[in-house]
Image: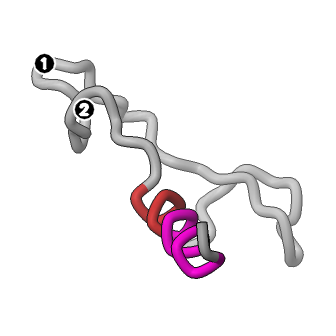
């Protein structure tokens, strides 16, 4: 094999990646329980570092 063909094949395999076994789905399934607890990330920088609160 020439280096060009080998490089082209390698780049194609990396860009396409593995094909998933089933189609991807977006969002929770129908009838799933709604999490109404909210989202409170742990801050990692600034004056509130290490605290769990809303950054807005």
Image quadrant containing the C terminus: bottom right
| Residue at 34% over, 36% down | 20
Residue 12 highlighted magenta (yes or no) = no
- Picture coordinates of residue 38 (x, y %)? 45, 43
Q: What element carries label 2?
A: loop
Which region of the structure is painted magenta? 3-11
Measure the alpha-carbon separation of dots 1 and 2: 8 Å
| Residue at 60% over, 66% down | 1
- Picture coordinates of residue 37 (x, y %)? 44, 35
Q: Which of 49 and 15 is in front in this view?
A: 15
- Name the residue beneath numbered marker 1: 31
Residue 4 highlighted magenta (yes or no) = yes
- Name the residue beneath numbered marker 2: 28
- Picture coordinates of residue 27 (x, y %)? 24, 40
| Residue at 64% over, 53% down | 41
| Residue at 18% over, 25% down | 29
């Amino acid at each position: 094999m020439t280096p060009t063909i080998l490089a082209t094949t390698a780049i194609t395999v990396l860009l396409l990646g593995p094909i998933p076994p089933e189609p991807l789905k977006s969002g929770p399934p129908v009838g799933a329980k709604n999490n109404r607890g909210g989202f409170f990330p742990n801050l990692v920088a600034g004056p509130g570092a290490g605290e769990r609160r809303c950054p807005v």
